[in-house]
Image: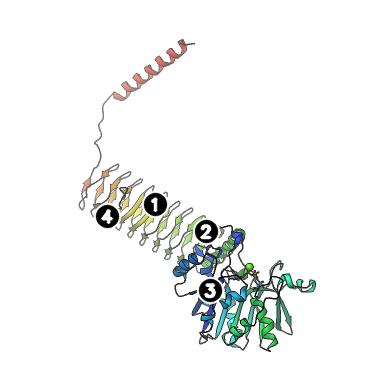
């Protein structure tokens, strides 16, 4: 089958009024990726080399977004929404390029998996002219019903056009179809609009093809993979299903999730075997974790690279550009942004490291802050191998701490420190014997005098 060429036509012209959003419906995200981009990924995974995106509502925004998530896709604008067949025909120029298989997909059905599409393509390879992807929803109301006779699909009847008898059919049209390229345009051009809604229904090609004695069949996909998103409740349902699938994959590939239902992945999270993720962890986009890492509870991680055997959290925040090398440690209430934490370095408590390098084996004391921003520009802090930064130090960038440099606690470091030097950046301590007692007595008698004066007023 792999030698058969395939075009995926993705319908995404609808407005999606029920989302109540300024954003076109199909650009709403699941796992940090627009739902239509999930559809594109599934099409590509099923072997589609051509991608035609049919847009309409919010066309400019859609074009801009498509350039990012599907740069190879050609966009076609459907000026008026006259129905799903009319929408497919908007991509006539792509279809007439002569693909073997044409997959029609919906931009608002983001959980469709490549297996369901591959199965449909296989039936085309076996000689079918039209393959409809069906499913059995718990409640079929609103869906087109699949009318079968002797193992062949003879028609799809939209709910509004169904007889009472037909409404009882549980096998429904998921919306997606695979059509033999050789027949596609001829079938589509034969569709009319004499139905309850006055629309050009894609589903009519089933009856048209059957009447021409072409082979028309249905395959079955899971309810979940055919879930169409119309409002934000369904969006959240799709997110939940996606997350559940991803957690299963992670666990089956060797990642321990102690409370899987509390861990949230992004569409592109990479996570190696023998990593342990504690409860309540959030992975934003762009996270790569090698093997054997420990991600402790309540950590928030995005755009970060975490090498083998690192230890992160609890309550760590790793922001874009955080790059933890082998066995590095970032502990509780620490934030790391655009910084390399080299092998075995430790950033354990209440610290901000931004625009910096922390050399191998360095130890960053509690409360250390890299002061990287003057309100206009960002500056770099370079901390050498094996350096020791005493607690509650401020490193005012640009600044370099040499290898083995030692910074006294509470320092404000504004000048670079050479290798193995000790730097103090604070006033020296002064101790005055008996002065504490004297102060205490003075404050006590002042308070007593005030109280007495207040009493005399009454
Ligand atoms: C469609 C199917 C129905 C199926 C259901 C599954 C048809 C006629 N009906 O109905 O059998 O059970 O999906 O969810 O195909 N679109 C355009 N331009 C248009 C019209 C639609 O791009 O002119 C796009 C929409 O944005 C959407 C998709 O096509 O992504 C489906 O259209 P929609 O109107 O939602 O079809 P349904 O009535 O749900
Ligand atoms: Ca729909």
Q: Which residue is mark 4?
A: 382
Q: Which mark is residue 263?
A: 2
For mark 1, give the secondary structure.
Answer: strand
Q: Which residue is mark 1?
A: 335
Q: CA distance from mark 4 to mark 3?
A: 44 Å
- At horizontal 52% and vertical 59% (from top left) the residue drawn is 263
Which callout, 4 or 3, points at the residue further toward the start of the chain?
Answer: 3
Determine which quarter of the picture holds residue 411: top left
Which callout, 2 or 1, points at the residue further toward the start of the chain?
Answer: 2
- At horizontal 37% and vertical 17% (from top left) the residue drawn is 446
The mark lying in front, picked from 3 and 2, is 3
Residue closest to the far right:
165
For mark 3, give the secondary structure.
Answer: helix
Q: Which residue is mark 3?
A: 42
Q: CA distance from mark 4 to mark 2?
A: 34 Å
For mark 2, give the secondary structure.
Answer: strand
Quick one: 427 or 26, which is closer to the camera? 26
For mark 4, give the secondary structure.
Answer: strand
Q: Is residue 307 above or below residue 212?
A: above
Left or right, 2 with respect to 85, comes to left
Left or right, 246 with respect to 223, comes to left
Q: Is residue 150 above or below residue 229?
A: below
Tell me the crowding category of disc 3: few under 14, some 14 to 19, or many 20 or more residues within 10 angstroms, Cα based.
many
**Number of marks in picture:** 4
Which callout, 3 or 2, points at the residue further toward the start of the chain?
Answer: 3
Q: CA distance from mark 4 to mark 1?
A: 17 Å
Determine which quarter of the picture holds residue 211: bottom right
Left or right, 17 with respect to 320, comes to right
Which callout, 4 or 1, points at the residue further toward the start of the chain?
Answer: 1
Determine which quarter of the picture holds residue 292: bottom left
The mark lying in front, picked from 3 and 1, is 3
Q: CA distance from mark 3 to mark 1?
A: 36 Å
């Amino acid at each position: 089958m792999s030698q058969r060429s395939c075009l995926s036509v993705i319908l995404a012209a609808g407005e999606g009024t029920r989302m109540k959003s300024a954003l076109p419906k199909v650009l709403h995200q699941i796992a940090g990726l627009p739902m239509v981009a999930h559809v594109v990924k599934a099409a590509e995974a099923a072997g589609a080399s051509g991608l035609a995106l049919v847009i309409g509502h919010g066309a400019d925004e859609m074009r801009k977004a498509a350039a990012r998530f599907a740069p190879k896709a050609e966009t076609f604008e459907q000026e008026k929404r006259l129905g799903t067949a009319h929408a497919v025909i908007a991509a006539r120029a792509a279809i007439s390029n002569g693909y073997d298989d044409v997959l029609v997909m919906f931009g608002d059905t983001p959980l469709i998996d490549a297996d369901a599409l591959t199965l449909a393509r296989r039936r085309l390879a076996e000689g079918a002219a039209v393959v409809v992807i069906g499913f059995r929803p718990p409640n079929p109301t609103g869906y087109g019903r699949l009318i079968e006779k002797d193992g062949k699909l003879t028609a799809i009847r939209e709910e509004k056009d169904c007889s009472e008898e037909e409404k009882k059919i549980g096998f429904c049209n998921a919306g997606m179809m695979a059509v033999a390229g050789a027949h596609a345009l001829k079938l589509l051009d034969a569709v009319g609009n004499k139905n309850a809604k006055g629309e050009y229904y894609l589903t009519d090609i089933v009856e048209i093809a059957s009447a021409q004695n072409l082979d028309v069949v249905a395959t079955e996909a899971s309810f979940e993979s055919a879930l169409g998103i119309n409002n934000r409740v369904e969006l959240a349902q799709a997110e939940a299903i996606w997350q559940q699938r991803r957690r299963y994959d992670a666990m089956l590939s060797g990642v321990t999730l102690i409370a899987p239902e509390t861990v949230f992945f992004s569409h592109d999270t990479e996570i190696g075997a023998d990593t342990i993720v504690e409860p309540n962890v959030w992975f934003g986009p762009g996270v790569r974790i090698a093997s054997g890492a420990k991600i402790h509870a309540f950590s928030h991680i995005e755009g970060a690279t975490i090498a083998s055997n690192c230890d992160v959290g609890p309550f760590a925040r790793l922001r874009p550009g955080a790059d933890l090398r082998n066995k590095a440690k970032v502990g509780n209430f620490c934030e790391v942004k655009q910084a390399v934490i080299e092998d075995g370095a430790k950033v354990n408590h209440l610290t901000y490291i931004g625009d910096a390098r922390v050399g191998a084996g360095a130890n960053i004391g509690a409360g250390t802050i890299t002061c990287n921003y003057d309100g206009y520009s960002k500056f770099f802090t370079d901390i050498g191998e094996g350096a020791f930064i005493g607690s509650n130090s401020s490193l005012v960038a640009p600044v370099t701490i040499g290898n083995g440099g030692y910074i006294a606690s509470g320092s404000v470091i504004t000048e670079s420190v050479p290798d193995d030097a000790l730097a103090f950046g604070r006033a020296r301590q002064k101790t005055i014997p008996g002065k504490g007692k004297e102060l205490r007595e003075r404050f006590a008698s002042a308070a007593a005098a005030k109280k007495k004066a207040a009493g005399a007023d009454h």
